Amino acid sequence: MTEGFKLTYSTMFNPPEELHTRFEGALAKIKANLGQEHAMIIGGQDHFAAEKFEDRSPINTDWVLGVFQKGGEQDAHQALAAAHQAFPMWSRMKWQERVALLRKAASLIDERIFEIGAAMALEVGKNRMESLGDVAETADLIRYACDQMEKNEGYVVEMGRDPLQGYTSTNYSVLRPYGVWLVISPFNFPGALTGGPTGAALAAGNTVVMKPATDTPWTVRLLAECLRDAGIPDGVFNYVTGPGRTLGKALVTCDHVSGVTFTGSFDVGMQLFRDFSDCRYVRPTILELGGKNPTLVSRHADLERAALGIVRSAFGLQGQKCSACSRVYIEAPVYDELVERLVGLTQKLAVGDPTDRSVYMGPVANSGAYQDFKDFSAELGKSGRFLTGGQVLTDGALGKGYFCAPTLVADLPYTHRLWKEEMFLPITTIGKVSSLEEGMQMANDVNYGLTAGFYGTPEEVEWFYDRIEAGVTYANRPQGATTGAWPGFQPFGGWKGSGSSGKNSGGLYYLPLYMHEQIRNMVK
C-alpha cells in the first residue's frame, strides 16, 4: 500500500498522506465510469440473466453505480454444476499449487485496494478508511488461510502404529475438502466476509459459489475478478447475483452443495440452518449471526480511552457492524463524567459523503435500514431520553441519501426489549450500574455473544475475561471498544446465537472447518 505502513482497523486512524492521495485518484476514476453492466461469472465465463437490477448508492440514490444480473433458479443450478464439475481437479491439485494461486489473488487485491475501496465506499457508505481496511483484511484473510495450510503441511498427520507382530500397520489422519461450498455474504463487509470464507474454502480444496448481498454486488464482482486474473481455474469459484428469496433459496439445495458459510441476521441464518438440514444427511453450516455487544466500564477506568473506544465502535460504519458497541454499562461513580465525554465526542462526528476524508459517518445501507432507524427512534423516545441524535438528516445533499444522526439513549428501562435486540444502526443505549457484577449479569443476559469491551484495572480485566460470554473480547482499547478484529491478531467469531462453529475466522482453528477427516490405515 505505502512504504512502511500496515493498514489494519487499529492503525487506520493516522494513515500517511499518500493513502489519501491514491484513494482520491481511484475514486475519480471510478466515478467517471459509473452505470456499466456487470455479468455474473459461472464456469469462468461472463454470464447474463434475462432480468437486471440497478445498484444505487445510499449516499445519493440518484447515482446508479452499475447494472447487475438478477439471477434465478436456473442460474443457481448452472453455478453449482460448474463448481461440482471443477471439484475433482481442484481437490486433487497439490495444496502447494492451490496456495500459490490464492496468494497471487491476495496480491492482486492489494494492488487494486484503492479501486475496490472506492467502489465499496460508494456502494456501502463506509468511510474511506473503513473501506480500505475491509479490502486489506480480505487479502490478509486469504493469506492467513494459505499460511495455515502451509504451517500444518496440508493437514496430513501420522498417528500411532498398531502393535501387530509380523505386520507394519500405519495410520494417517488426512483432512480432505467436502465438495462445493456456498458463501453467502452480507452488505456491511462485502470484501472480508466474502473473500475470507471463499479463501478458506478454496485453500482447503473445495470449489465455491459466492452470492453477495443485493446491496453490494459491485465490490464482490471486483474481488471475483482478482480470483479470475490470478489464474484460478474455470468453475473453481463462481459469482452469482440476485435476490435471496429466489436465487439464494435455489442455492441452498440438497444437490451439489456440501457446506455453507452465511453471515447475516439471526432470523435469516436460523431459517437457512433449518432449510439446509432438511436433506439426506447433516452438512457443515458455518453461521455468523450478529451481536448485541456490551461495553462494561469500571469506576477505575481511564475515561478518555473508554469514551474514544465506545464512540468509535458505536458509530463506525453507522453502527452496521455485527460487532458494534450497542449497549454500555457504566459504574455509577463515573457515569456522569463518562456520559458527558461520550456526548461531546459523538456531537463532533462528521456525517456526510463517506468518500470525503473529513467524514466519519456515511449513510445507512438502504431504505429498509433508514425506516428502521425512524421506527426505533420513535420507540426509544417514548421510554428513554436522547442524549444526542434520534433523527434522520435531510438537509441539502443529505436528503438524497439515507443519513441518520449518531444516537445515544439514556434512562431506558432495563426491561425494554431494545437492550437485547439487535438494531444494526447508529443507536447505542447507555445505563448506570451499581457494580461490575450487576453490569456483567446484564451483559450476558442476551441470546448473542459476539464481542465485548471492558475498561478497568488489570485485575478487573482478568475478572472480565473469565465471566464474559463472547467470542472476541477487548480491554482498555481506545481504537475500538468492541470492534477492530484482524486476522492473525484477533480472530473473529461468536458464542451462543452469534455463531455456530465455536471457531473464529482468521484464527488457528478456522480452516479445518472446511475439511473433513479421513483416517488411512494400511497394513504391510
Image: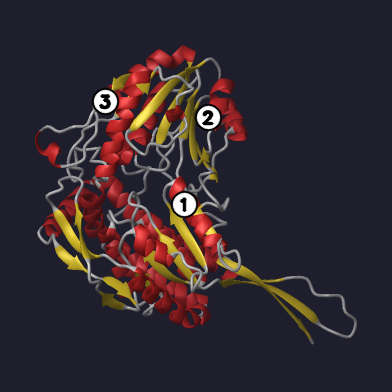
Location of the C terminus (image quadrant):
bottom right
Three-letter code for the amino acid on which mark 2 is drawn: Ala
User: Which quarter of the picture shows residue 512?
Assistant: bottom right
Three-letter code for the amino acid on which mark 3 is drawn: Gly
CA gap, disc 3 to disc 1?
Answer: 31 Å
Report the residue that reaches farthest toward the bottom.
524
- Foreground pick, 454 / 320: 320
User: What residue did someone put label 3 on?
Assistant: 389
> Residue 208 appears at what percent x and percent y?
43, 70
Label 3, residues with CA under 10 Å away: few <14, some 14-19, many ≥20 = some
User: Which quarter of the picture shows residue 77?
Assistant: bottom left
Location of the N terminus (image quadrant):
bottom left
Q: Which mark is residue 72?
A: none
Q: On the picture, is 29 further left or further right than 80?
A: left
Tag in front: 3 or 1: 1
Number of callouts in the render? 3
> Residue 308 appears at what percent x and percent y?
36, 29
- What secondary structure is marked by label 2? helix
Q: Which mark is residue 443?
A: 2
Three-letter code for the amino acid on which mark 1 is drawn: Gly
Q: Which mark is residue 269?
A: 1
Tag in front: 1 or 2: 1
The answer to whether residue 488 is visible is no
- Foreground pick, 406 / 420: 420
The answer to whether residue 287 is visible is yes
Q: On the picture, is 68 further left or further right than 249?
A: left
User: Given contact means CB atoms under 8 Å apart, are the residues at marks 2 and 3 in contact?
Assistant: no
